Amino acid sequence: MGVKVKGINKAKSNLDKFISTVQGKKAARAIQSAMLIGSTQAALYTPIDTSTLLNSQFRELSVNGTMITGRVGYTANYAVYVHDPAHPQTFRRSTAQKEFLTKGFEDTREAISAVIRKEMSL
């Protein structure tokens, strides 16, 4: 005794459409939003002398198949030394900190998680 089930093909096509939407738009938008939140906080912690370091901040989103990667960094040559806690320095800016990029993302972890949940929801 066989039972006919209707709508299997439509359900499959809807699932494929949903997966492509998540991969294509929603995930990229979530990563972009997370990078914006973290990099904004990192900019607050970035030491400013001539603003070269702050102005060299970049965000990059790359898609490799199903993997989406976001990258935030600084192009100024001396950014590594300013970021490194092993090189002691004093800063003029009151909010400036060592490891400014790492701390910027750590301090906004909850906001980043919330925005990713929001972007990935239906």
Image (tube, rainbow, N blue to C red):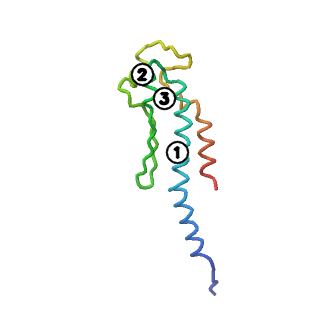
- Identify whether 60 is placed above or below 23: above
Q: Earlier in the sequence, mark 2 or mark 1?
A: 1
- Checking the image for residue 31, the label placed there is 1
Q: CA distance from mark 3 to mark 2?
A: 10 Å
Residue at 40% x, 52% y: name it: 64
| Mark 2, secondary structure of its residue | loop
**x, y percent for residue 79:** 40, 25
Q: Residues within 10 Å of mark 1 (few under 14, many from 20)?
A: many
| Rendered location of residue 91, percent (x, y) | 49, 14
- Residue 108 image-quadrant placement: top right
* Picture layout, residue 65 above or below residue 93: below
Q: Which residue is nearer to you in this view: 49 or 112?
A: 49
Looking at the rendered structure, the secondary structure element under dot 3 is: helix
User: Where does residue 87 sit, x and y in percent of width and height?
Assistant: 40, 16
Neighbourhood count class around disc 3 (C-alpha, 10 Å): few under 14, some 14–19, many 20 upward: many
Tell me what residue is drawn at x 63 percent, y 87 percent: 1
Residue in the foreground of this view, choosing between 93 and 26 = 93
Which SS class for mark 1?
Answer: helix
Q: Which residue is mark 3?
A: 101
Say what amino acid the circle numbered 3 marks: Leu
- Image mark for residue 84: 2
Task: Using residue 85 as the reference point, say whether residue 15 is left or right of it.
Answer: right
Q: Are marks 3 and 2 in contact (CB under 8 Å)?
A: no
